[in-house]
Amino acid sequence: MIGVLVSGFGSNLQALIDSGLPIVAVGSNRNDAYALTRARAAAIPTATFSLDCHDNREERDLVMATWLEQQGVELVVLAGYRHLLTRPFVARFPGRIVNVHPSLLPSFPGAHPIEDALAAGVETTGVTVHLVDEGVDTGPILVQEPVPVEPRETLEARLHAVEHRLLPETVAGLLPAGRAA
Ligand code: GRF
């Protein structure tokens, strides 16, 4: 059973939903994330874990981890989730948190990978799906796919198209046999 964490538009969440993966919970750090609307439209339980409602990040993450476990989540997917997860959360799902990032990690980690790749003048960037640890876009790489930078007008759309294929494929491969769709 999959839990997805989101912060924004939720196009990766939509790709996961459309793939028919067993998503049982969608959590967010922001109550205005459009991704939550997508989850509700798919009748998936949602919850918001705003930092404002907790003393610190660790406490927020523990409450979030407990909610995910209560929904039966075994595998957590970060789909545009823009907060760093703290040690207590990562420890609750060891080796069972997956992230998608629009660069060929370890190149261009962080919040602006597409802009950073353009600024660096590389010819090829790409998409990485990796396991999550406490670092910023670190953790063992599961799969990568290169994407040419040119034509740069369409780079963002081409990267997202790869994300929307690669993330569901990789997540499906991590589920116990017979659980994918
Ligand atoms: C994606 O590019 C994802 O790789 C990155 O943030 C973006 C989220 O987009 N971490 P969306 O919310 O899934 O549309």
Image: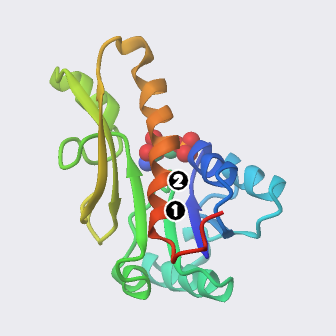
x%, y% of residue 79? 52, 54
* Whole-percent x, y for residue 149 in the image: 29, 20
Q: How far is disc 1 from disc 2 in space, using C-alphas?
A: 6 Å
Q: Amino acid at mark 2?
A: Pro
Dot label at residue 172: 1
Asked whether disc 1 touches disc 2, contact meaning CB atoms under 8 Å apart, the reply is yes
For residue 33, say whether it is visible: no
Estimate the x, y position of residue 96 in percent, counting from the top left. 42, 76
Residue at figure coordinates x 17%, y 20% from the top left: 121
Residue drawn at the location 18% of the way across and 43% of the way down: 107
155, 80: nearer the viewer: 155
Q: Is residue 37 above or below residue 88?
A: above
Check disc 1: other Cα within 10 Å, few if <14, some if 14-19, many if 20+: many
Q: Is residue 135 left or right of residue 35?
A: left
With respect to residue 43, does 73 lie above or below? below
Q: Is 16 or 91 nearer to us in this picture?
A: 16
The total number of labels drawn is 2
Q: Which residue is mark 2?
A: 168
* Quarter of the C terminus within the rendering: bottom right
Query: Which picture quadrant has residue 84?
Result: bottom left
Q: Residue at x 23, y 41 (%)?
A: 108
Q: Is residue 132 left or right of residue 4?
A: left
Q: Amino acid at mark 1?
A: Ala
Residue 51 in view, yes or no: yes
Q: Out of 49 and 54, give the one closest to the viewer.
A: 49
Q: Which quadrant, please, contains the N terminus?
A: bottom right
Write down the quadrant of residue 68 in the picture.
bottom right
Q: What residue lies at 46% left-to-right and 42% top-to-bottom?
A: 163
Secondary structure under badge 1? helix
Say left or right for 89 vs 31: left
